[in-house]
Amino acid sequence: MSSTLIRNIKTIYGIQTQPLPYKKGAAMSVVDTLSDAYILTEGEVIVSYGPMTSMPERADVVIDANYGLVMPAWCDSHTHIVYAQGREGEYVDRLKGVSYEEIARNGGGILNSAGKLQAKTEEELYLSALARLDEVIQYGTGALEIKSGYGLTTESEIKMLRVIRRLKESSTATIKATFLGAHAIPLKYKENRQAYIELVINEMIPLIAGEGLADYCDVFCDKGFYTVEETDKILKSASSYGLKAKIHANELAISGGVQIGVANQAISVDHLEAIGQEEIECLLASDTIPTVLPSCSFFLHIPDAPARKMIDAGLGIAIATDYNPGSSPSGNIPLLMALACNNMRLLPTEAFNGVTINGACAMELGESHGSIAPGKIANLIITKPISSLDYMVYAFGSGHIDKVMLKGKMR
């Protein structure tokens, strides 16, 4: 196997020195570092790191970091990058004062994306999604979850998930797939929503599980979308086919989504713009990872999830982009970290842990991704020569990333 030596690193960020990777509460502000360092990889994995004074004498490939920083590639645990086209018209409508809920009621939003996606071929969807995937890799993302949910028919949901499978096969990025057939109620079923829920449960889930197309099943449990009872029914059905739960919860209102996610042992509950102390207590008593989406709040001009309060209460959070055409058309994690710090009042180290090790854990990848340790996948970011992680977040308008390594290979 080919070896690669990265030398002259100003500082390595995100070294894992403890056996338990997921960071909670005060630990979220702690990032272990090593200055004046090297990293050695072999094949797809990291084999060692240390001070320059103990650097190995040779390797097959030598990369000079030129005193840039090195950190684990980002782990984006909530995206929707398979879609037909943008929704900039709705963006302008919102600027004119039309609410997100009004747009959805009028057939826009998710239903708009579903109509456009149903008309696209698998190849067209694959090529457009591949371009977005390449884009986020350039921003430093090395692992991500991609959801379906813009199909809303059996044929189109399966088409989306097959596109995600092709992305898994063709990219060096690590990808988890999530079935989100319960993203909205199609117009066809507006007067008979139970019939659509039965379609999800009795047709979509068995076919998707049978083809091995998804790792998780998600439901949009919120005001105007799916009720707690409907969500519970769908997640229990998915679990019987081996699909673990994830959930869109409490974006628009305190919906009971957090509690039903925890009751179904959800890997994560995502959004959380509207939660209170009861939801925080519920999460503290569970293994479910709360995931916040700062760029969604920024783009929709809605309140941010109370991430500062959550961390101060002892929770660990993941931070994800929610990259999608309607509420967060960006996969730029360096910008996302700046939004988390400025708008949620997180420290740069807390934002860093949210998009690295905690993001990895929200995809069940904590043992292999999200930090720098021997045996972990060699997904690494090399920055241009800058002073610190704090500077990278502070100077949010500049492109600080110089190189990205995925699975031991430079992109």
Image: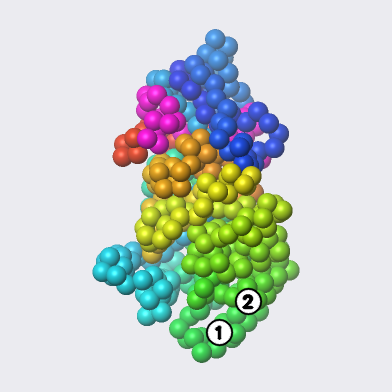
- Please report the residue visible at 61 percent of the width from the left and 37 percent of the height from the top: 26
Within-10-Å neighbours for mark 2: few <14, some 14–19, many 20+: some
**Amino acid type, mark 1:** Arg
Q: Measuring 67% from the left and 75% from the top, which residue is drawn there?
A: 233
Residue, disc 2 = 230
Question: Does the magenta portion include 156?
Answer: no
Q: Secondary structure at mark 1?
A: helix
Asked if one can make out residue 386 in the rendered structure from this viewpoint, the answer is yes
Above or below, 386 against 53 in this view is below
Q: Quadrant of residue 254?
A: bottom right
Cβ atoms under marks 1 and 2 closer than 8 Å: yes
Label 2: which secondary element: helix
Task: Look at the image and tell me whether residue 401 can be seen.
Answer: no
Farthest residue, direction right:
240
Q: What colour scheme does the image use?
A: rainbow
Label 1 and label 2: CA atoms lie apart by 10 Å
Label 1 vs 2, first from the N-terminus:
1
* Residue 185 percent location from the top left of the image: 51, 79
Which residues are drawn in magenta?
367-394
Q: Amino acid at mark 2?
A: Glu
The image quadrant where one finds the C terminus is top left
**Residue drawn 54% across and 21% down?**
34
* Left or right, residue 165 beside residue 285: left
- The x, y position of residue 6, in whole percent, is 49, 23
Query: Residue 52: x percent and y percent?
Result: 52, 13
Quarter residue 19 falls in: top right
* 166 is higher (above) or lower (below) than 387: below
Taken as a whole, is the magenta stretch helix, strand or loop? Answer: loop
- Above or below residue 196? Residue 373 is above
What residue sits right under mark 1 in the picture?
193
